[in-house]
Every structure is written in C-alpha cells, then in structure tokens.
Amino acid sequence: MSRLGDIAVKVRSKNAGPFWLTVDIFCGSQSVFAQVRTSITSARIAGVFGAEIAVVNRYEMDSLNVLKFSLPRPAVQGTRQDRDMHGASFAALVAELEV
C-alpha cells in the first residue's frame, strides 16, 4: 500500500469560507486518479475530520484528474478552538491515508 501523498501530485486543503474546508487531491494521471477515486471515499475523509458522512461533499473532475471534498471546518475560522486559520495544515492528515 502507498500513502496518498506519495502517489498524488499534490494534496491541498484550504478555507472555503469561515465555516467550510476544501480538500483537493491532484492526481496527475488517469491511472492514479482511478486508484484514488476508488480508495479515498467520503467516509474516509469524514473519519479523518471526525465529521458525519452526510455533510461531506465529493466532487470528481475527470478531465483534470482531481478529486475534491468540501466539509464543515472542525472549528469556525478565527475562534479560540481553530488551530489553523487558513485550513492549509489539514492536507497533511489526508496525505497520510493509505491508498
């Protein structure tokens, strides 16, 4: 098994407003995209963030070989509980997933 971060060109997370987070997985090729598409499910992403699967939105962009997830931030941006104002460090958690 491989880590997602080892086979994807880039795993990126960022704010999608103060209440939402977006995770982008850039696969670089159709073969890697096919592997990631089947392995990285909404349930696995929900598990990483401790979120309910019902609130995880999944988008597949076949022509770009990109898989994207949007979900509520673990803490509202800028609150005392927020550990990452920009949402960028969450990508490291996703990149560690086994594919």
Image (cartoon, rainbow, N blue to C red):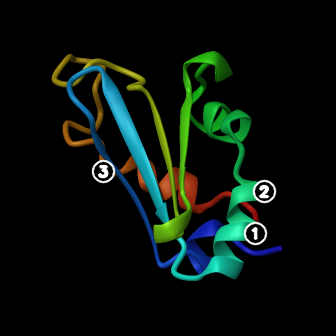
> Of the numbered discs in the image, which one, if any, rests on residue 35?
1
Callout 3, which amino acid? Answer: Ala
The residue singled out by tag 3 in the image is 88
Say which residue appears at 64% left-offset and 78% top-offset: 30
Task: Answer few, some or many: residues within 10 Å of disc 2's Cα (few below 14, many 20 plus, some between 14 and 19).
Answer: few
Q: Residues within 10 Å of mark 3 (few under 14, many from 20)?
A: some
Corner quadrant of residue 95:
bottom right
* Crowding near the residue tagged with mark 1, few <14, some 14–19, many ≥20 C-alpha atoms within 10 Å: some
Tag 1: amino acid: Gln
Q: Residues at badges 2 and 3 in contact (C-beta under 8 Å)? A: no
Q: SS of the residue at dot 3?
A: loop
Numbered mark located on residue 98 in the image: none
Q: CA distance from mark 3 to mark 1?
A: 24 Å
Gap in angstroms between the C-alphas marked 1 and 2: 6 Å
Marks 3 and 1 in Cβ contact (< 8 Å): no
Query: SS class of the residue under badge 1?
Result: helix
Looking at the image, tell me whether mark 3 or mark 1 is earlier in sequence order.
Answer: 1
Residue occupied by mark 2: 38
**Mark 2 residue type:** Thr
Point out the image quarter for the C terminus: bottom right
State the residue at coordinates (63%, 67%).
4
Which residue is at the front of the view, 90 or 70?
70
Q: Residue at x 26, y 34 (%)?
A: 16
Closer to the eye: label 2 or 3: 2
